[in-house]
Image: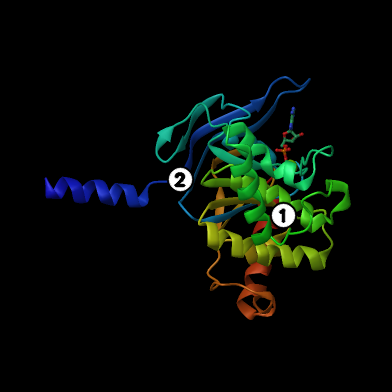
Amino acid sequence: MADGLMGDKATIQVQSHLQFENVSFTYSHANKPTSVFEKTNLSIYEKEFVTILGPSGAGKSTFFRLAAGLEQPKSGRIMIQGKEEANRLGKIGYMPQQDLLLPWRTVLENGLLPLEIKGMDKKEASDLVKQHMKKFGLEGTENNYAHQLSGGMRQRVSFLRAILGGNDILLLDEPFSALDSMTRFMMQEWLLEQWHEWEKTIIFITHDVEEAIFLSDRIFMLTHPPIEGNIDEVNVPLSRPRNEEHRSEADFMELKQNLFKKMRAKEQFL
Ligand code: ADP
Ligand code: MG
């Protein structure tokens, strides 16, 4: 019996938080069907920070739509914590490319959305959002509307909403791509602090090699659909916590060059 328990424990430790197993997916409603995934495999583990890196049209958002349950695979399985989940909507926090803050709602009211959906008491929900706003550097913006906020602030409200959704896996689709480079660098550091504090599994999409390296434990590389079999991945062996100085370190630069080379080599096969 003791052996059996040990065995179970060992299995739990290596279990993926999110897993794609032989997943195939084709957009068939278009004039010309586009096969995006062909028997694709990938595993993401608990509390990892992984990035899906690739140029426009590579299939990054489609990966998210599948993971979040907005699309279903043609064949294969998508598993959360080892269990096949057909209904993934609501089990994975999803922050789409557009921040989707409701323009007619104030910052506070936008933050309240996921709690309203859960049916939380109004006063309790409002207190909780305000508490989080303070942590997210959004104090004093409660009654502002989205258009009155800076790009960085909008993304923080959006992230706050994803956190309040209460899911352990967060998918962030190019959240910083519209920001100027200074704000972007600051938001990357900010996001790493949040990831550390909330202990979430984060899957981040970007087309920016440097951003992928700065943030991630592992990077999955996509270049062009269809993506077949195992997705190519690269480990990022840089120490944490990461800050501005890491960007100019030799290891960082070398990794950046390697990644560029790998992405280029992958494209040549097409
Ligand atoms: P990325 O997010 O990496 O830019 P997408 O996942 O959006 O890429 O797109 C991958 C491929 O699927 C592209 O060839 C794109 O044209 C196609 N595609 C994306 N969304 C749809 C859709 N709703 N219908 C048909 N084809 C689509
Ligand atoms: Mg996209």
Which of 190 and 180 lies nearest the eye of the viewer?
190
* Image position, residue 237 (x, y; %): 52, 69
Which of 76 and 143 lies nearest the eye of the viewer?
143
Q: List the residue tagged with mark 1.
A: 156
The quadrant the N terminus occupies is: top left
* Image position, residue 2 (x, y; %): 13, 49
Tell me: is circle 2 under 8 Å from ligand 1: no
**Residue 84 marker:** none
**Residue 17 marker:** 2
Residue 226 visible in the current orientation: no
Q: Residue at x 50, y 57 (%)?
A: 199
Q: Is residue 22 above or below residue 246?
A: above
Q: Amino acid at mark 1?
A: Arg
Q: Amino acid at mark 2?
A: His
Quarter of image, res 36: top right
Q: Is residue 265 left or right of residue 198?
A: right
Q: Earlier in the sequence, mark 2 or mark 1?
A: 2
Residue 119 visible in the current orientation: yes
Q: Is residue 98 left or right of residue 28?
A: right
Q: Is residue 200 above or below residue 188?
A: above
Which of 193 and 265 lies nearest the eye of the viewer?
193
Q: Secondary structure at mark 2?
A: loop
Label 1 Cα crowd, 10 Å radius (few <14 / some 14-19 / many 20+): many
Q: Residue at x 63, y 49 (%)?
A: 127
Q: Residue at x 42, y 41 (%)?
A: 81
Q: Is residue 248 above or below residue 60?
A: below
